[in-house]
Amino acid sequence: MEFAELIKTPRADNVVLHCPFHLAVEGTLCLTGHHLIFSSRRQDNAEELWLLHSNIDSIEKRFVGSLGTIVIKCKDLRIIQLDIPGMEECLNIASSIEALSTLDSVTLMYPFFYRPMFEVLEDGWSSFLLEQEFELLSSVTNEWRLSCVNKEFSVCPSYPPVVIVPKSIDDEALRKVALFRQGGRFPVLSYYHKKNGMAMLRSSQPLTGTNGRRCKEDEKLINATLRSGRRGFVIDTRPLTVAQQARAKGGGFEQEVHYPQWRRIHKYIERFNILQESFIKLVEACNDQSHNMDRWLSKLEASNWLTHIKELLTAACLAAQCIDRESASVLVHGSEGTDSTLQVTSLAQIILDPRCRTIRGFEALVVREWLQAGHPFQQRCAQSAYSNSKQKWEAPVFLLFLECVWQIHRQFPCSFEFNEQFLIMLFEHAYASQFGTFLGNNENERAKLKLPQKTMSLWSWVNRPEELSRFQNPLYEANSLVIWPSVAPQSLQLWEGVFLRWNRPSKFLEEAEVERINIIKYNKELQAKVNALRRQLAEMEADEGVQEEP
Protein backbone atom coordinates (compact mmCIF):
# COMPACT_ATOMS: atom_id res chain seq x y z
CA MET A 1 0.00 0.00 0.00
CA GLU A 2 1.20 3.51 -0.86
CA PHE A 3 0.67 6.25 1.72
CA ALA A 4 -0.25 8.59 -1.16
CA GLU A 5 -3.47 6.58 -1.61
CA LEU A 6 -4.59 7.64 1.88
CA ILE A 7 -3.69 11.33 1.51
CA LYS A 8 -6.54 13.08 -0.31
CA THR A 9 -5.23 16.61 0.32
CA PRO A 10 -1.49 16.70 1.04
CA ARG A 11 -1.31 20.45 1.70
CA ALA A 12 -3.54 23.29 2.84
CA ASP A 13 -2.75 27.01 3.15
CA ASN A 14 -4.24 29.65 5.46
CA VAL A 15 -4.71 27.09 8.23
CA VAL A 16 -4.88 28.45 11.80
CA LEU A 17 -3.28 26.33 14.55
CA HIS A 18 -4.43 26.51 18.18
CA CYS A 19 -2.00 24.80 20.62
CA PRO A 20 -1.94 24.83 24.42
CA PHE A 21 -0.13 27.94 25.80
CA HIS A 22 0.56 29.40 22.32
CA LEU A 23 -1.19 32.19 20.45
CA ALA A 24 -3.15 31.10 17.39
CA VAL A 25 -0.89 31.17 14.34
CA GLU A 26 -1.63 30.99 10.62
CA GLY A 27 0.41 28.84 8.27
CA THR A 28 0.60 25.84 5.97
CA LEU A 29 -0.47 22.31 6.89
CA CYS A 30 1.21 19.33 5.21
CA LEU A 31 0.39 15.64 5.53
CA THR A 32 3.05 12.99 4.99
CA GLY A 33 2.86 9.23 5.47
CA HIS A 34 3.70 9.52 9.17
CA HIS A 35 3.51 13.17 10.20
CA LEU A 36 1.16 16.09 10.34
CA ILE A 37 3.42 19.13 9.84
CA PHE A 38 2.41 22.73 10.42
CA SER A 39 4.69 25.59 9.31
CA SER A 40 4.00 29.19 10.29
CA ARG A 41 4.26 32.11 7.89
CA ARG A 42 7.05 33.69 9.87
CA GLN A 43 10.03 34.86 7.82
CA ASP A 44 12.23 32.07 9.23
CA ASN A 45 9.48 29.58 8.23
CA ALA A 46 10.08 27.76 11.51
CA GLU A 47 7.99 24.60 12.01
CA GLU A 48 5.44 25.05 14.74
CA LEU A 49 4.40 21.43 14.93
CA TRP A 50 5.53 17.92 13.90
CA LEU A 51 2.94 15.41 15.07
CA LEU A 52 3.18 11.65 14.53
CA HIS A 53 -0.06 10.23 13.15
CA SER A 54 0.37 7.35 15.60
CA ASN A 55 0.08 9.90 18.44
CA ILE A 56 -3.46 10.80 17.36
CA ASP A 57 -6.13 9.17 19.53
CA SER A 58 -9.23 10.72 17.97
CA ILE A 59 -10.37 13.63 15.81
CA GLU A 60 -13.55 15.67 15.75
CA LYS A 61 -14.89 17.79 12.86
CA ARG A 62 -16.97 20.95 13.17
CA PHE A 63 -18.23 23.39 10.52
CA VAL A 64 -19.37 27.00 10.63
CA GLY A 65 -20.32 28.03 7.13
CA SER A 66 -17.41 27.14 4.85
CA LEU A 67 -14.88 27.19 7.70
CA GLY A 68 -14.00 23.74 9.00
CA THR A 69 -12.40 22.94 12.34
CA ILE A 70 -10.55 19.72 13.20
CA VAL A 71 -9.93 19.01 16.88
CA ILE A 72 -7.08 16.51 17.31
CA LYS A 73 -6.86 14.66 20.63
CA CYS A 74 -3.46 13.05 21.18
CA LYS A 75 -2.35 9.98 23.09
CA ASP A 76 -0.02 12.20 25.17
CA LEU A 77 -3.28 13.97 26.29
CA ARG A 78 -2.66 17.14 24.23
CA ILE A 79 -5.58 18.75 22.38
CA ILE A 80 -4.84 20.67 19.15
CA GLN A 81 -7.24 22.60 16.96
CA LEU A 82 -6.88 23.34 13.23
CA ASP A 83 -9.12 25.87 11.47
CA ILE A 84 -9.19 25.03 7.74
CA PRO A 85 -10.92 27.23 5.10
CA GLY A 86 -13.11 25.20 2.76
CA MET A 87 -15.43 22.36 3.75
CA GLU A 88 -14.17 19.87 1.14
CA GLU A 89 -10.54 20.52 2.03
CA CYS A 90 -11.32 20.06 5.73
CA LEU A 91 -13.21 16.79 5.14
CA ASN A 92 -10.37 15.44 2.97
CA ILE A 93 -7.74 16.29 5.58
CA ALA A 94 -9.83 14.81 8.42
CA SER A 95 -10.41 11.59 6.49
CA SER A 96 -6.68 11.35 5.62
CA ILE A 97 -5.65 11.84 9.27
CA GLU A 98 -8.14 9.18 10.41
CA ALA A 99 -6.79 6.67 7.88
CA LEU A 100 -3.12 7.41 8.61
CA SER A 101 -3.57 7.29 12.41
CA THR A 102 -5.27 3.87 12.36
CA LEU A 103 -2.95 1.80 10.16
CA ASP A 104 -3.37 -1.93 10.79
CA SER A 105 0.07 -3.11 9.76
CA VAL A 106 2.87 -2.65 12.30
CA THR A 107 5.47 -2.59 9.50
CA LEU A 108 3.88 0.58 8.08
CA MET A 109 4.54 2.47 11.32
CA TYR A 110 7.13 5.22 11.53
CA PRO A 111 9.87 3.27 13.40
CA PHE A 112 10.40 1.20 10.22
CA PHE A 113 11.01 4.39 8.21
CA TYR A 114 12.83 6.53 10.80
CA ARG A 115 16.51 7.22 10.20
CA PRO A 116 18.33 8.89 13.12
CA MET A 117 20.06 12.23 12.60
CA PHE A 118 22.32 11.60 15.60
CA GLU A 119 25.47 9.52 15.95
CA VAL A 120 24.60 6.12 17.41
CA LEU A 121 27.03 5.48 20.28
CA GLU A 122 25.51 2.23 21.55
CA ASP A 123 23.08 -0.35 20.21
CA GLY A 124 20.16 -0.11 22.61
CA TRP A 125 18.82 -3.48 21.45
CA SER A 126 21.78 -5.27 23.06
CA SER A 127 22.25 -2.93 26.05
CA PHE A 128 20.18 -4.96 28.53
CA LEU A 129 20.46 -8.64 27.70
CA LEU A 130 19.36 -11.18 30.30
CA GLU A 131 22.81 -12.81 30.03
CA GLN A 132 24.28 -9.61 31.51
CA GLU A 133 21.81 -9.74 34.42
CA PHE A 134 22.78 -13.37 35.00
CA GLU A 135 26.47 -12.40 35.20
CA LEU A 136 25.65 -10.00 38.04
CA LEU A 137 23.57 -12.70 39.74
CA SER A 138 26.35 -15.31 39.37
CA SER A 139 28.76 -13.06 41.26
CA VAL A 140 26.67 -13.44 44.45
CA THR A 141 25.04 -16.91 44.17
CA ASN A 142 25.38 -20.16 42.22
CA GLU A 143 21.84 -21.42 42.90
CA TRP A 144 20.41 -20.27 39.55
CA ARG A 145 20.99 -21.03 35.89
CA LEU A 146 20.17 -19.65 32.46
CA SER A 147 17.74 -21.85 30.58
CA CYS A 148 17.29 -21.76 26.78
CA VAL A 149 14.26 -24.07 26.93
CA ASN A 150 12.21 -21.38 25.17
CA LYS A 151 14.81 -20.76 22.44
CA GLU A 152 12.29 -21.08 19.58
CA PHE A 153 9.42 -19.59 21.66
CA SER A 154 7.91 -23.09 21.57
CA VAL A 155 7.37 -23.55 25.32
CA CYS A 156 5.93 -20.09 26.05
CA PRO A 157 5.16 -17.66 23.19
CA SER A 158 5.16 -14.62 25.50
CA TYR A 159 8.48 -15.37 27.29
CA PRO A 160 11.94 -14.41 26.00
CA PRO A 161 14.25 -17.12 24.57
CA VAL A 162 16.36 -17.13 27.76
CA VAL A 163 15.07 -17.20 31.37
CA ILE A 164 16.62 -17.60 34.83
CA VAL A 165 15.44 -20.62 36.86
CA PRO A 166 16.66 -22.64 39.89
CA LYS A 167 19.75 -24.71 39.03
CA SER A 168 18.14 -27.87 40.42
CA ILE A 169 15.32 -27.78 37.83
CA ASP A 170 16.10 -29.19 34.38
CA ASP A 171 14.54 -28.17 31.06
CA GLU A 172 12.32 -31.26 30.84
CA ALA A 173 10.73 -30.30 34.18
CA LEU A 174 10.23 -26.74 32.89
CA ARG A 175 8.31 -28.08 29.88
CA LYS A 176 5.97 -29.97 32.20
CA VAL A 177 5.48 -26.93 34.44
CA ALA A 178 4.71 -24.80 31.35
CA LEU A 179 1.79 -27.12 30.52
CA PHE A 180 0.47 -26.51 34.06
CA ARG A 181 0.59 -22.70 33.85
CA GLN A 182 -1.65 -20.49 31.70
CA GLY A 183 -0.01 -19.53 28.41
CA GLY A 184 3.03 -21.62 29.36
CA ARG A 185 4.25 -18.90 31.74
CA PHE A 186 6.09 -21.11 34.25
CA PRO A 187 7.68 -19.47 37.36
CA VAL A 188 10.94 -17.62 36.54
CA LEU A 189 13.25 -15.43 38.60
CA SER A 190 12.23 -11.80 38.72
CA TYR A 191 14.54 -10.53 41.50
CA TYR A 192 17.20 -11.88 43.87
CA HIS A 193 17.67 -10.00 47.15
CA LYS A 194 21.41 -10.04 47.85
CA LYS A 195 20.94 -9.00 51.49
CA ASN A 196 19.35 -12.34 52.52
CA GLY A 197 19.26 -14.53 49.40
CA MET A 198 15.47 -14.41 49.05
CA ALA A 199 13.94 -14.59 45.55
CA MET A 200 10.89 -13.11 43.84
CA LEU A 201 9.38 -15.27 41.09
CA ARG A 202 6.61 -14.43 38.62
CA SER A 203 4.32 -16.62 36.55
CA SER A 204 0.71 -17.02 35.39
CA GLN A 205 -2.04 -18.89 37.27
CA PRO A 206 -1.80 -22.67 37.68
CA LEU A 207 -4.29 -24.72 35.64
CA THR A 208 -5.72 -26.66 38.60
CA GLY A 209 -9.31 -26.62 37.32
CA THR A 210 -12.28 -28.00 39.26
CA ASN A 211 -10.59 -31.39 39.75
CA GLY A 212 -7.68 -29.92 41.72
CA ARG A 213 -5.07 -30.98 39.17
CA ARG A 214 -1.50 -30.83 40.44
CA CYS A 215 2.00 -30.76 38.94
CA LYS A 216 4.84 -32.11 41.09
CA GLU A 217 7.44 -30.40 38.89
CA ASP A 218 5.73 -27.06 39.58
CA GLU A 219 5.77 -27.71 43.31
CA LYS A 220 9.44 -28.69 43.14
CA LEU A 221 10.34 -25.59 41.10
CA ILE A 222 8.94 -23.02 43.51
CA ASN A 223 10.06 -25.01 46.58
CA ALA A 224 13.61 -24.86 45.21
CA THR A 225 13.65 -21.14 46.13
CA LEU A 226 12.90 -21.78 49.82
CA ARG A 227 15.50 -21.95 52.56
CA SER A 228 15.36 -24.96 54.90
CA GLY A 229 12.46 -24.62 57.34
CA ARG A 230 11.27 -21.33 55.79
CA ARG A 231 7.89 -20.48 54.27
CA GLY A 232 7.14 -18.56 51.11
CA PHE A 233 4.32 -16.26 50.03
CA VAL A 234 2.17 -16.44 46.90
CA ILE A 235 0.79 -12.98 46.11
CA ASP A 236 -2.24 -13.41 43.85
CA THR A 237 -3.34 -10.12 42.25
CA ARG A 238 -6.96 -11.34 41.96
CA PRO A 239 -9.64 -11.33 44.68
CA LEU A 240 -10.30 -14.79 46.11
CA THR A 241 -13.72 -14.99 44.45
CA VAL A 242 -12.23 -14.38 40.97
CA ALA A 243 -9.45 -16.93 41.62
CA GLN A 244 -12.09 -19.51 42.68
CA GLN A 245 -14.27 -18.75 39.63
CA ALA A 246 -11.20 -19.24 37.39
CA ARG A 247 -11.19 -22.94 38.35
CA ALA A 248 -14.41 -23.44 36.40
CA LYS A 249 -12.57 -22.23 33.27
CA GLY A 250 -9.56 -24.46 33.89
CA GLY A 251 -7.51 -21.95 35.88
CA GLY A 252 -7.13 -21.65 39.62
CA PHE A 253 -4.58 -21.15 42.39
CA GLU A 254 -1.97 -23.03 44.43
CA GLN A 255 -3.83 -25.30 46.86
CA GLU A 256 -2.38 -25.53 50.36
CA VAL A 257 -2.49 -29.32 50.37
CA HIS A 258 0.08 -29.40 47.54
CA TYR A 259 1.99 -26.25 48.55
CA PRO A 260 2.10 -26.56 52.39
CA GLN A 261 5.16 -24.30 52.71
CA TRP A 262 3.49 -21.42 50.86
CA ARG A 263 0.96 -18.96 52.24
CA ARG A 264 -1.37 -17.44 49.66
CA ILE A 265 -2.35 -13.75 49.92
CA HIS A 266 -4.89 -12.14 47.59
CA LYS A 267 -4.19 -8.48 46.76
CA TYR A 268 -6.73 -7.29 44.24
CA ILE A 269 -5.41 -5.05 41.47
CA GLU A 270 -7.82 -3.82 38.78
CA ARG A 271 -7.12 -4.55 35.13
CA PHE A 272 -8.28 -3.99 31.53
CA ASN A 273 -11.55 -2.11 31.00
CA ILE A 274 -11.88 -0.94 34.62
CA LEU A 275 -8.45 0.73 34.42
CA GLN A 276 -9.17 2.21 30.99
CA GLU A 277 -12.49 3.68 32.16
CA SER A 278 -10.74 5.13 35.22
CA PHE A 279 -8.09 6.72 32.96
CA ILE A 280 -10.78 8.24 30.69
CA LYS A 281 -12.70 9.66 33.67
CA LEU A 282 -9.55 11.17 35.18
CA VAL A 283 -8.54 12.90 31.95
CA GLU A 284 -12.10 14.17 31.52
CA ALA A 285 -11.99 15.61 35.05
CA CYS A 286 -8.63 17.28 34.42
CA ASN A 287 -9.95 18.88 31.20
CA ASP A 288 -13.08 20.25 32.90
CA GLN A 289 -12.50 24.01 33.00
CA SER A 290 -15.61 24.87 35.04
CA HIS A 291 -13.37 25.74 38.05
CA ASN A 292 -15.99 24.37 40.45
CA MET A 293 -14.21 22.83 43.44
CA ASP A 294 -17.00 20.39 44.39
CA ARG A 295 -17.31 19.23 40.78
CA TRP A 296 -13.53 18.71 40.46
CA LEU A 297 -13.21 16.73 43.71
CA SER A 298 -16.28 14.66 42.88
CA LYS A 299 -14.97 13.78 39.40
CA LEU A 300 -11.49 13.00 40.74
CA GLU A 301 -12.96 10.64 43.34
CA ALA A 302 -15.32 9.04 40.77
CA SER A 303 -12.36 8.21 38.51
CA ASN A 304 -10.91 5.93 41.25
CA TRP A 305 -7.44 6.55 39.77
CA LEU A 306 -5.72 7.30 43.08
CA THR A 307 -7.40 4.22 44.59
CA HIS A 308 -5.75 2.08 41.90
CA ILE A 309 -2.41 3.74 42.74
CA LYS A 310 -2.87 2.96 46.43
CA GLU A 311 -3.83 -0.69 45.76
CA LEU A 312 -0.84 -1.23 43.52
CA LEU A 313 1.67 0.41 45.88
CA THR A 314 0.23 -1.60 48.79
CA ALA A 315 0.73 -4.88 46.92
CA ALA A 316 4.29 -3.91 45.92
CA CYS A 317 5.14 -2.95 49.52
CA LEU A 318 3.75 -6.29 50.70
CA ALA A 319 5.98 -8.20 48.26
CA ALA A 320 9.01 -6.15 49.33
CA GLN A 321 8.16 -6.64 53.01
CA CYS A 322 7.90 -10.43 52.63
CA ILE A 323 11.35 -10.52 51.02
CA ASP A 324 13.24 -7.96 53.12
CA ARG A 325 11.61 -8.15 56.57
CA GLU A 326 10.12 -11.66 56.65
CA SER A 327 13.12 -13.21 54.83
CA ALA A 328 10.72 -15.18 52.65
CA SER A 329 10.68 -15.90 48.93
CA VAL A 330 7.68 -14.65 46.95
CA LEU A 331 5.76 -15.86 43.87
CA VAL A 332 3.59 -13.20 42.18
CA HIS A 333 0.87 -13.95 39.64
CA GLY A 334 -2.64 -13.02 38.56
CA SER A 335 -4.30 -14.74 35.61
CA GLU A 336 -2.05 -14.26 32.58
CA GLY A 337 0.92 -12.79 34.47
CA THR A 338 1.46 -10.02 31.89
CA ASP A 339 -0.08 -6.97 33.61
CA SER A 340 -0.68 -6.61 37.37
CA THR A 341 2.00 -9.25 38.04
CA LEU A 342 4.63 -7.12 36.29
CA GLN A 343 3.45 -3.97 38.04
CA VAL A 344 3.99 -5.60 41.44
CA THR A 345 7.35 -7.24 40.70
CA SER A 346 8.86 -4.12 39.12
CA LEU A 347 7.63 -1.74 41.85
CA ALA A 348 8.89 -4.10 44.57
CA GLN A 349 12.33 -3.87 42.94
CA ILE A 350 12.17 -0.04 42.97
CA ILE A 351 11.60 -0.30 46.73
CA LEU A 352 14.27 -2.96 47.39
CA ASP A 353 17.05 -2.39 44.86
CA PRO A 354 19.03 0.89 44.68
CA ARG A 355 20.25 -0.06 41.18
CA CYS A 356 16.69 0.19 39.84
CA ARG A 357 16.64 3.79 41.01
CA THR A 358 19.48 4.74 38.64
CA ILE A 359 18.84 5.64 35.01
CA ARG A 360 20.42 2.55 33.46
CA GLY A 361 19.10 0.33 36.23
CA PHE A 362 15.56 1.56 35.60
CA GLU A 363 15.96 1.06 31.85
CA ALA A 364 17.14 -2.50 32.53
CA LEU A 365 14.09 -3.01 34.77
CA VAL A 366 11.69 -1.84 32.02
CA VAL A 367 13.38 -4.16 29.51
CA ARG A 368 13.50 -7.17 31.86
CA GLU A 369 10.16 -6.87 33.67
CA TRP A 370 8.02 -5.38 30.89
CA LEU A 371 9.43 -5.89 27.39
CA GLN A 372 11.12 -9.29 27.82
CA ALA A 373 8.47 -10.45 30.30
CA GLY A 374 5.77 -10.10 27.64
CA HIS A 375 3.63 -7.10 28.58
CA PRO A 376 1.48 -6.59 25.43
CA PHE A 377 2.36 -2.94 24.71
CA GLN A 378 0.88 -3.05 21.20
CA GLN A 379 -2.52 -4.00 22.59
CA ARG A 380 -2.52 -2.00 25.83
CA CYS A 381 -1.30 1.27 24.28
CA ALA A 382 -3.32 1.11 21.03
CA GLN A 383 -5.62 3.82 22.42
CA SER A 384 -5.25 6.48 25.08
CA ALA A 385 -7.99 8.40 26.94
CA TYR A 386 -9.75 10.07 24.00
CA SER A 387 -10.47 7.27 21.53
CA ASN A 388 -14.06 6.89 20.35
CA SER A 389 -13.69 3.31 19.13
CA LYS A 390 -14.78 0.37 21.26
CA GLN A 391 -12.22 -0.84 23.77
CA LYS A 392 -10.57 -4.16 23.07
CA TRP A 393 -7.43 -4.79 25.11
CA GLU A 394 -6.44 -1.21 25.92
CA ALA A 395 -5.45 -0.35 29.50
CA PRO A 396 -2.97 2.16 31.01
CA VAL A 397 -1.10 -0.59 32.87
CA PHE A 398 2.39 0.79 32.13
CA LEU A 399 1.29 4.39 32.84
CA LEU A 400 -0.05 3.27 36.23
CA PHE A 401 3.34 1.71 37.00
CA LEU A 402 5.15 4.92 35.96
CA GLU A 403 2.83 6.98 38.16
CA CYS A 404 3.55 4.72 41.15
CA VAL A 405 7.28 5.27 40.54
CA TRP A 406 6.60 9.03 40.45
CA GLN A 407 4.70 8.80 43.77
CA ILE A 408 7.71 7.05 45.36
CA HIS A 409 10.09 9.54 43.67
CA ARG A 410 8.14 12.43 45.20
CA GLN A 411 8.48 10.91 48.69
CA PHE A 412 12.21 10.16 48.22
CA PRO A 413 13.40 12.99 45.92
CA CYS A 414 17.13 12.36 46.54
CA SER A 415 17.09 8.58 45.99
CA PHE A 416 16.49 8.56 42.23
CA GLU A 417 19.08 9.38 39.58
CA PHE A 418 16.36 10.24 37.05
CA ASN A 419 13.80 13.05 37.15
CA GLU A 420 10.09 13.32 36.40
CA GLN A 421 10.77 14.17 32.74
CA PHE A 422 12.36 10.73 32.29
CA LEU A 423 9.12 9.01 33.38
CA ILE A 424 6.97 11.29 31.18
CA MET A 425 9.24 10.54 28.20
CA LEU A 426 8.71 6.78 28.72
CA PHE A 427 4.93 7.28 28.89
CA GLU A 428 4.98 9.21 25.60
CA HIS A 429 7.15 6.68 23.75
CA ALA A 430 5.05 3.72 24.96
CA TYR A 431 2.05 5.23 23.13
CA ALA A 432 3.72 6.76 20.05
CA SER A 433 7.38 6.75 19.05
CA GLN A 434 9.91 6.92 16.23
CA PHE A 435 11.72 4.05 17.97
CA GLY A 436 10.84 0.35 17.77
CA THR A 437 11.31 -0.47 21.46
CA PHE A 438 7.62 -0.62 22.44
CA LEU A 439 6.30 -2.18 19.21
CA GLY A 440 4.90 -5.70 19.41
CA ASN A 441 3.40 -7.56 22.38
CA ASN A 442 6.36 -9.79 23.29
CA GLU A 443 9.86 -10.83 22.25
CA ASN A 444 8.46 -13.45 19.87
CA GLU A 445 6.62 -10.80 17.84
CA ARG A 446 9.62 -8.45 17.92
CA ALA A 447 11.85 -11.22 16.57
CA LYS A 448 9.39 -11.96 13.73
CA LEU A 449 9.22 -8.24 12.87
CA LYS A 450 13.05 -8.11 13.01
CA LEU A 451 12.85 -4.91 15.06
CA PRO A 452 16.52 -4.94 16.17
CA GLN A 453 17.61 -5.03 12.52
CA LYS A 454 14.97 -2.71 11.08
CA THR A 455 14.31 -0.09 13.77
CA MET A 456 16.26 2.07 16.21
CA SER A 457 16.09 1.42 19.97
CA LEU A 458 14.84 4.14 22.30
CA TRP A 459 17.82 3.45 24.57
CA SER A 460 20.28 4.33 21.76
CA TRP A 461 18.84 7.86 21.85
CA VAL A 462 18.17 8.25 25.60
CA ASN A 463 21.65 7.16 26.70
CA ARG A 464 23.55 9.74 24.63
CA PRO A 465 25.25 12.21 27.03
CA GLU A 466 23.40 15.25 25.65
CA GLU A 467 20.01 13.57 26.17
CA LEU A 468 20.87 11.99 29.53
CA SER A 469 21.60 15.40 31.02
CA ARG A 470 17.92 16.35 30.50
CA PHE A 471 16.76 13.37 32.54
CA GLN A 472 19.19 13.55 35.49
CA ASN A 473 17.93 14.47 38.95
CA PRO A 474 20.17 17.24 40.40
CA LEU A 475 19.23 16.19 43.95
CA TYR A 476 20.38 12.58 43.51
CA GLU A 477 22.56 11.03 46.20
CA ALA A 478 23.02 7.27 45.97
CA ASN A 479 20.97 5.58 48.70
CA SER A 480 21.79 1.90 49.31
CA LEU A 481 18.86 1.41 51.69
CA VAL A 482 15.43 -0.09 51.09
CA ILE A 483 12.91 2.77 50.76
CA TRP A 484 9.42 2.31 52.18
CA PRO A 485 6.85 4.64 50.60
CA SER A 486 3.76 5.75 52.47
CA VAL A 487 0.54 4.47 50.90
CA ALA A 488 -1.75 6.56 53.10
CA PRO A 489 -4.33 8.44 50.99
CA GLN A 490 -2.91 11.76 52.25
CA SER A 491 0.50 10.83 50.81
CA LEU A 492 -0.74 10.31 47.25
CA GLN A 493 -1.12 13.17 44.79
CA LEU A 494 -2.36 13.67 41.25
CA TRP A 495 0.52 13.45 38.78
CA GLU A 496 0.25 16.99 37.45
CA GLY A 497 3.23 16.55 35.13
CA VAL A 498 1.14 14.15 33.00
CA PHE A 499 -2.49 15.01 33.63
CA LEU A 500 -2.37 18.80 33.96
CA ARG A 501 0.61 19.75 31.80
CA TRP A 502 -1.57 20.78 28.81
CA ASN A 503 -4.15 22.56 30.99
CA ARG A 504 -1.99 25.09 32.77
CA PRO A 505 1.20 26.87 31.78
CA SER A 506 4.41 25.36 33.16
CA LYS A 507 6.68 28.30 32.28
CA PHE A 508 7.18 29.44 35.88
CA LEU A 509 7.67 25.86 37.10
CA GLU A 510 10.34 25.36 34.42
CA GLU A 511 12.05 28.62 35.39
CA ALA A 512 11.97 27.56 39.05
CA GLU A 513 13.46 24.18 38.09
CA VAL A 514 16.32 25.86 36.17
CA GLU A 515 16.98 28.12 39.18
CA ARG A 516 16.95 25.10 41.52
CA ILE A 517 19.47 23.26 39.32
CA ASN A 518 21.72 26.36 39.29
CA ILE A 519 21.54 26.65 43.11
CA ILE A 520 22.42 22.96 43.53
CA LYS A 521 25.30 23.29 41.05
CA TYR A 522 26.61 26.40 42.84
CA ASN A 523 26.28 24.62 46.20
CA LYS A 524 28.36 21.69 44.89
CA GLU A 525 31.04 24.10 43.63
CA LEU A 526 31.18 25.81 47.04
CA GLN A 527 31.32 22.42 48.76
CA ALA A 528 34.26 21.42 46.57
CA LYS A 529 36.05 24.68 47.48
CA VAL A 530 35.40 24.09 51.19
CA ASN A 531 36.82 20.55 50.93
CA ALA A 532 39.88 21.85 49.06
CA LEU A 533 40.49 24.55 51.70
CA ARG A 534 40.10 21.98 54.49
CA ARG A 535 42.70 19.75 52.86
CA GLN A 536 45.00 22.75 52.42
CA LEU A 537 44.56 23.74 56.08
CA ALA A 538 45.24 20.18 57.24
CA GLU A 539 48.45 20.10 55.14
CA MET A 540 49.61 23.47 56.60
CA GLU A 541 48.94 22.28 60.15
CA ALA A 542 50.87 19.07 59.46
CA ASP A 543 53.82 21.09 58.07
CA GLU A 544 53.83 23.37 61.15
CA GLY A 545 53.84 20.32 63.40
CA VAL A 546 56.92 18.95 61.62
CA GLN A 547 58.74 22.31 61.91
CA GLU A 548 58.02 22.60 65.66
CA GLU A 549 59.60 19.22 66.40
CA PRO A 550 63.14 19.71 67.96
Image (cartoon, rainbow, N blue to C red):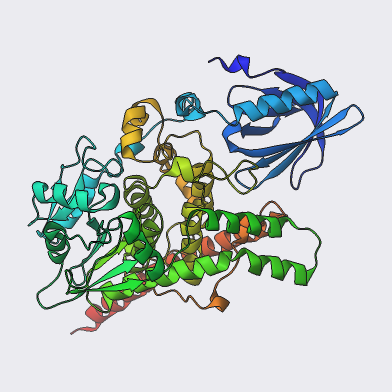
Residue 14 placement (x, y as % from top left): 83, 25
Image position of 413 (left or right of 211):
right
* Rendering quarter of residue 518: bottom right
Residue 540 placement (x, y as % from top left): 32, 74
Residue 150 position (above or below residue 403): above
Residue 256 visible in the picture:
yes
Residue at 76% across, 72% down:
294
Residue 544 placement (x, y as % from top left): 29, 79
Residue 2 position (above or below residue 451): above
Residue 322 position (above or below residue 104): below
The residue nearer to you, when weighing 272 against 444, is: 272
Residue at 44% across, 44% down:
377
Residue 88 position (above or below residue 384): above
Q: Quadrant of the C terminus?
A: bottom left
The residue nearer to you, when weighing 93 against 34, is: 93
Image position of 444 (left or right of 67):
left
Count every numbered label the image shows and give the total: 0
* Rendering quarter of residue 482: bottom left
Residue 237 visible in the picture:
no
* Rendering quarter of residue 3: top right
